[in-house]
Image (cartoon, coloured by chain):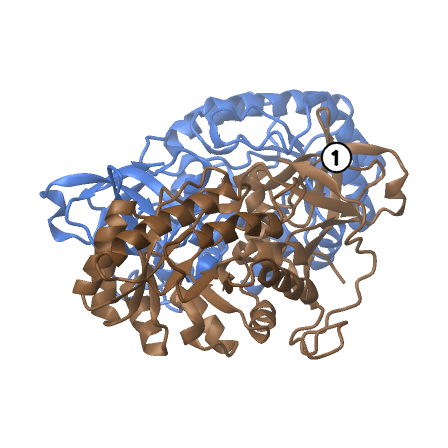
Chain colours: A brown, B blue
Amino acid sequence: MPTPYLVTDLDTVAGRYAAFRRALPGVHVHYAMKCNPAPEILATLAARGAGFEIASLGELRMLQRAGVDPADVLYSNPIKPPSHIAAAHAAGLWRFSFDSPNELAKIAETAPGSAVYVRLRVDDEASVFPLSRKFGAGLDDAYDLMLLAGRLGLRPYGITFHVGSQSGNPQAWRRAIGDAGRLMSRLRAEGIEIEMLDLGGGFPARYVAPVPSLDEIAAVIEPAIGELPYRPALITAEPGRALVAEAGELATGVIGREQRGDENWLFVDVGAYHGMMETLQAEWSYPITTSVPEQATGPMLPFTITGPTCDPSDTMFTEVWLPATVDVGDTLYIGSAGAYTLAYASEFNGFPAPTPLFVGDLDGHSDGGFGNAFAGPTLTGSPLGGLTIAGGR
Amino acid sequence: MPTPYLVTDLDTVAGRYAAFRRALPGVHVHYAMKCNPAPEILATLAARGAGFEIASLGELRMLQRAGVDPADVLYSNPIKPPSHIAAAHAAGLWRFSFDSPNELAKIAETAPGSAVYVRLRVDDEASVFPLSRKFGAGLDDAYDLMLLAGRLGLRPYGITFHVGSQSGNPQAWRRAIGDAGRLMSRLRAEGIEIEMLDLGGGFPARYVAPVPSLDEIAAVIEPAIGELPYRPALITAEPGRALVAEAGELATGVIGREQRGDENWLFVDVGAYHGMMETLQAEWSYPITTSVPEQATGPMLPFTITGPTCDPSDTMFTEVWLPATVDVGDTLYIGSAGAYTLAYASEFNGFPAPTPLFVGDLDGHSDGGFGNAFAGPTLTGSPLGGLTIAGGR
């Protein structure tokens, strides 16, 4: 199989989904498909009962092509093009998030009578990718907005928040759920009982640095839910990265090895613009292994790893310890590459984006092994689960 | 025409090419197609005699589909996949850049007998996007490498350098040409006279901040060439941005207007991941106008402009002064958007990349107006050339 390619193990996706449901049995899942909208992943999760969370009409159309009922979809982007709201409403989607009077007016006009859920601004300082500058209403505003929703003929349906992507502190959920509870009490005094509490996303995936487990997060979330003034009919969450990141492994070929000053550089056939954009956005380490057979025992060297383009900004990693002999023709395997990779890959400089491949059981009905409709090649040389070596940029 | 779309005026591309040739009459042009590989632009430049510079085999294939002879193409990415070198060589491309012994060995093996040109590391501090950490050999190494090229059966053909993308200081070329001259003298003492001096790219486009004109740069380059120990048979350059950036205008629709803290925010249907990536990479201002008719006279306010996704990192601009009345349904026109925009646009969050449209004369033989094969719609409301308002992030 020529590099670059991205192998996704659908069994891992299914397993992570099951683990999420097990850790939080009373919490439904609406998968945040923005992190990886591959049809195979949508089908895998749909077959197991997941709902979906969208950011645009384009994403709803992808779900419809995968056979998902729009009634099972949450439109959680707080600011939406009016035409997208109207078309989603016409398709049968009935729940829209908002965080402002302008957005409420938009929804009332283009999707009259819809259910709406307010996005609270919450503490996201413990996350790698905070979101609260762009989105979210304060508690007082959220209260006013839910009352306004009713006056506009909308159904004041729920409350949501987002603790930031890849959150490292379960207490962020506790505080956010506490805020939601205070809003619930105030709204109840006005005769409004919400039907949905949406815990948002931010559930971390395992890359290299330790992260709280789903069980540790659940141990904080469950009692916080228990302290709410009442239990809404639907409690859901929008995991994305936590379900799919660890299911993906990106294989990239070494096309050059050079000494640049004191540094050893590897040039590979995938860069920041071909799927590894998040390496530019944060101090971020991925588990990286190689096809070099003696890697477990031979001497190691620190490498800078850059992409194939003429642009230095596609440099992904520095100080990644790899076998000293790694060279042109070898393959690097970047683990935990299933989220936010192909979702914004381009073909910058004329280099192709990684080919998506899938292994595992798509529909939950076959006996494991390769998926029925999406059989990939047998993966030889892939050290998934083997020695992992951290690299951070 | 629904937003988002990117209109490219091919007459402007042709005009910028003519201006480049006029400013530097003895210098050929090999267009750096990585900045915008649209077939219409390739055809426009090919029809007027330009050569091309590529970063990958993928780009060569695009050129071949546009009818360009690979013999007129320079492969200037210093580090290349061996399979790309072999296939380009087989297609008739005969000139390859390099900056290391490893790359020379690769070329000698996969494209024996080819002409090679060494990439010098030069001062790129005056550029917005410096390149010298990733690429380039020092003067002594470059000398050794050119001798090694001959011993490997390759043709020690030329010298190149890159002063960094969007360079603001013409003296960078003077110093680099001086370095090339010193290398030429040393090589001549060994019996090697180079056939090509390639001045690389870095020629700036006009966004908002003032940049040196082509004439000002030529006034530095021409005398520097005059001081070389001899004049190589071919002197060429690799402008990209300078030829196409100003030819493009990106139209994006306002989908939301909100107050966030003290800031006025506009949400538009294009973000950093749909073509405006460079807004994330540098302090960078674009000329921005709107469809609001009274913009020249009404009151103005400063806006933060963000994309349509759930990701705050697709925020493109802050403190852009726009008409106070701008709102949902209006259009923003982002000027100088012809380079490094669609080249790495994705459909992140399910939002489409801008539709490419072309106006102007493709082949130089019709009487202006719309291109023959690529007629676009009449552009109404586009204030190209009108009031420009700076916004920087």
Q: Going 29% across and 46% down the picture, which residue do you hit?
A: A139
Would you say B369 lies left or right of B217 here? left
Q: Amino acid at mark 1?
A: Glu
Which residue position is annotated with label 1? Answer: A258
Q: Going 11% across and 41% down the picture, which residue do you hit?
A: B299
Q: Nearer the viewer, residue A217 or A58?
A: A217
> Tag 1: Cα neighbours inside 10 Å, few (<14), some, or many (≥20)?
many
Q: Nearer the viewer, residue A245 or A270?
A: A245
Visible residue check, residue B17: no
Q: Going 42% across and 28% down the picture, which residue do you hit?
A: B168
Locate the C terminus of chain B by quadrant.
Answer: top left
Q: Nearer the viewer, residue A268 or A207?
A: A207
* Residue A158 at x, y percent in the picture: 34, 61
Could you tell me how many numbered marks the image carries?
A: 1
* Residue B178 at x, y percent in the picture: 58, 21
Q: Going 55% across and 73% down the picture, which residue do you hit?
A: A49
Residue A32 to residue A224: above or below:
below
Pointer 1 chain: A
Q: Quadrant of residue B323?
A: top left
Residue B296 to residue A20: above or below:
above
* Residue B105 at x, y percent in the picture: 81, 41
